Image (spheres, coloured by chain):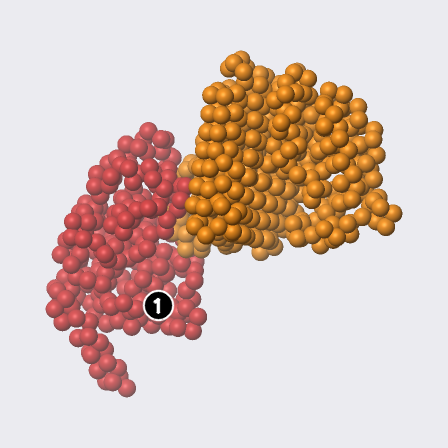
Chain colours: A red, B orange
Amino acid sequence: MSLLEIKNLHVGVKDAKILKGVDLTVNRGEVHAIMGPNGSGKSTLALVLAGRDTYEITEGEILYKGEDLLEVAPEERAREGLFLAFQYPVEIPGVSNVYFLKAALNAIRKHRGQEELDAMDFLTYVREKMALVKMDETLLNRPVNEGFSGGEKKRNEIFHMAVLDPVLAVLDETDSGLDIDALKIVADGVNSLRSEERAFIIITHYQRLLNYIVPDVVHVLLDGKIVRTGGKELALELEEKGYSWLEGEVHEEAVAHA
Amino acid sequence: MPETIAAVSPAGLAPEAEVYTRAFARVAVERTDHEPSRIGTLRKAAIDRFGELGFPNRKLEEWRSTDVRAIATTTFSFEPSAELVSEADCARFRYDNTHELVFVNGAFRSDLSRLQELPDGVIISSLEQGWREHPELIEPHLGRHAKFDNHAFVALNTALHENGVFVFFPRNAVVETPIHILHLGRGGDSPVASFPRNLFVAEENSQGRIIEQFATAGDTDTGGNHFTCPVTEVVLAQNAVVDHYKLQRESTDAFHMATFQIYLGRSSNFSSHSISWGGGLVRNDVNAVLGGEGCEATLNGLYMVGGTQLVDNHMRVDHVAPHCDSHELFKGVLEGHARAVFNGRIFVHKGAQKTDAKQTNRNLLLSPTALVHSNPQLEIFADDVRCTHGSTVGRLDELGIFYLRSRGIGEEAARSLLTYAFCADIVQRIKDKSVRRDLEEFLFRRLPQGDVVRQAV
């Protein structure tokens, strides 16, 4: 059984159609990259996976571990191992980053029938994960994302991911706006978490991140549809030719169908 | 003010106001044997003025959103019946390591109070004792700052006040142990009205912290109705530093009409945090006069109300002298059918150059039926000043809730966490550990899934 199966997914908001029949299958152990220009529906796909309810699902289904994901509340998805690293992480003043994570992790552990971690065990565990993403300890005790730089926010998302230990992690443009050093740190964090049990969907506009996180499969999302799927070399081809190369093909295809 | 007379019946006095003038004749006179004659005259003038004013009605600009008919039409007893309250009722409101004075329905309970050893010259006593022992220290201040000409409740307090607290920090004194004044109200068969009158005087270069707590004895939800009408005058001389907290946690049946009047002398620094979560009908008038050059006033507050509670914070800051700063940050959380009023007036007088005044009021509505009237006002008569004001009314950020849920936090807990986050900057500004802990505990209890919040902050 595949970890994630998206079948003919159509998503809209108000009258606008954003996703127009997406099919995607992800197995444990795989890293998928979804590339596409702005407005192609990449972030919508990520947010729908995590359970944002401002979108309307007009057609299709999403199966996660064989179960209908669309019926499940966002927090239940998280407890079942789904994680979304936000493109724009939210600032939460007054709520400490580390204690918030403790509450989140314990909610997940409780759901999994594991014992809640006490303060000492949690701190030991968190220190391990911090090392993975080279997190500065001061960011641990600050309020969640408040006053963080763009790069710190993105690293904090990867840190949250490391702590919450997901089965399927979706990274929504985590590379946007990062300098090369920060990009490498994010990539190292992801690579250290790659395993046979875990899958990643890396959503990105640019190919550069994929030099450091080498994907098994690359998809191109254009105007709400996956128009091309290939190996890691597809990313390089896109970098060279730009998305307009595929836009042309899509158009021809449409004409051919007509 | 012709419209203020409108509350008065053609016979000269509204019937509901007559109760108070009769009480004055009966009660106030016997309370005044220890006071100088000026105060007797002042009391008489105040009750006469109340007779003219009557209770405020909603035609008055300052009372447009706050209807006090429920107070006017309730028959209160003026006998404190203070013996109804015991140590057991006090215990949960006590703060360790403070000088603690306990009042029950306005009457001083020395048996429940706990005063520690005081530095030389520092006075913490009931007002009555203060008048007996140090009239020369009270006389220059009491009744000279809080004006009753246009305020019925200040008039009532001035006329009818039975007792209160006198705090005196002499020159250069640093009072490290906070002073905690606990006002316990208790409803009975007939609700009691009390009129505490406080005077805090900080002489030159002195420092101290004063905490006022207003609570209801017995069960907070069913503790019953009582009416507390305090007036506090605070006077800071040059370079004095006073840190003040007010915790309003009375029963949701209680009425609370308070006036807090501050005078700041040169280079003095006054900071106040006013927390209101109790009371059914609550009004806080806070008036600060920045009278000496280079002084600084911080007036912050937090209100969290639900049900049919109404809380009204009426702020007025008078910048009289140049080079003074005032900062006001009031935040409110409203649930159910609760209503809040925030009226903030900053008045920069001619000559108060280099004024730096900032006022912010932010409100979070957790229900569609809650209502906020926020009304910041600036009046500026100097030309070299920096004044800003702003007010917002909003709801919880849905994206923030989704973000928290996407990390495994349940929806209810996510809402509570964001509500806590909204309050956090006020919570963090509270330097007094006891007050801060009380506020945090309140929030953990009040917010659904509060244990998750407790774990996460």
* Residue found 37% across the figure and 61% down from its top: A48
Left or right: B407 with respect to A184? right
Q: Which residue is mark 1?
A: A9
Q: Mark 1: few, some, or many residues within 10 Å (few <14, many ≥20)?
A: many
User: B71 or A8: nearer the eye?
Assistant: B71
Figure quadrant of residue B35: top right
Q: Position of residue B175 (x, y in %)?
A: 49, 21
Query: What is the tally of numbered marks visible in this picture?
Result: 1
**Residue A93 in view:** yes
Q: Position of residue B142 (x, y in %)?
A: 64, 29
User: B9 or A148: nearer the eye?
Assistant: B9
Left or right: B10 with respect to A33? right
User: B210 or B167: nearer the eye?
Assistant: B167
The correct choice, above or below, for B137 with respect to B448 in the image is above
What kind of residue is marked 1? Leu
* Residue found 84% across the figure and 49% down from its top: B9
Left or right: B95 with respect to A138? right
